[in-house]
Image (tube, grey):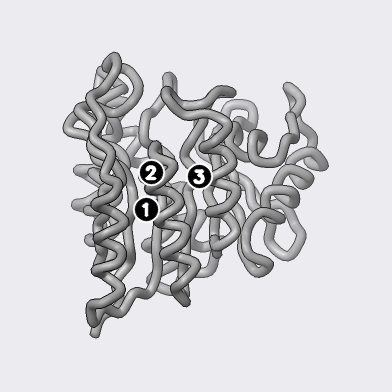
Amino acid sequence: MQKRLLLAQDLSVVGDLSLTVALPLLEVQGVKTLPLPTSLLSTQSEGFGEPCILPCYPWIEQTLAHLQKLDLTLGGALLGYLDDLKTGQALLNFLQEQSLALTVIDPVFADEGKFYPNLGPEHLALQKELLQVADYATPNVTEAQFLTGIRLSDEPSKAEFCALLEQTQQLVKATGQVVITGLSFGAEKGCLWLEEGTLKQCSYPKLAGHFYGSGDVFAALLTGALWQGASFSQAIKKATKETYEALCETAKNYPKRQEGIDISRLLQKL
């Protein structure tokens, strides 16, 4: 039986991000998914006022219990935005009982130096617990700083970046690896990771404005590449390039950035 990947993220009626973009991006890469909406939102949580939110707990707890009784071959998991603490704990309990070959945690709780709306220190604590089962983690630079307590200077040195990565990597499995996204390098923006102790960078020219959901696209592309057998570095480079292509399309086609990420051309390419 073909292995499947558990995909746990929120689902918004308005906003091309989270589950809305991750599901097609994974499926088009040949990843059979088990999509699990962690909460239902009328709109994504930023840019549209206060959204109407329907938490999916205890349905999720019952669904996870049901899945364990089925003849399913679960090969991995990708977890993203979790606004409900009980849902996060249910997913953590489920993952701790599994022996998965690939667990990717995208600790979505903050950006641009602050927590997302309706999230706070308790969600930070939850993500620290979830990272303990992660083979790979994809925090942005704000999340990595919150997770470690490290504060980068205005112009971080290579030593600062290495310290941030090393401390973040202490939070995942002993064999786990971390890539930090959303970093600025002069006129470029991209990510950093460690490869055999050496700092590696992949970046592209900066695009004006903020892109809601870019991390969701990156995490889905990275997971798909890892699922297909790419090395961590290969997967990062592929995901960064394709995310940048999607951001270029978004800048051209989505004048209202809160609408999310335009992945239509990227899906055609994949």
Q: Is residue 67 above or below residue 197?
A: below
Numbered tag placed on residue 216 in the rendering: 2
Between the C-alphas of marks 2 and 1, the distance is: 6 Å
The residue under label 1 is: 220
Residue placed furthest toward the bottom:
1
| CA neighbours of label 1 inside 10 A, class few (<14), some (14 to 19), many (20+) | many
Kindly state the secondary structure of the residue where label 3 is placed: loop
Q: Amino acid at mark 2?
A: Asp
Of 128 and 56, nearer the camera is 56
Relative to 4, say whether 107 is above or below. above
Q: Quadrant of the C terminus?
A: bottom left
- Residue reaching furthest top? 49
Residue at the location (23% across, 37% down)?
40
**Residue drawn at (55%, 62%) of the image:** 133
Of pointers 2 and 3, the one earlier in the residue sequence? 3
Q: CA distance from mark 1 to mark 3?
A: 13 Å
Q: Is residue 203 above or below residue 46?
A: below
Q: Which mark is residue 107?
A: 3
**Mark 1 and mark 2 in contact (Cβ < 8 Å)?**
yes
User: Residue at position x 30%, y 73% from top?
Assistant: 68
What residue lies at 32% left-to-right and 17% top-to-bottom?
Answer: 47
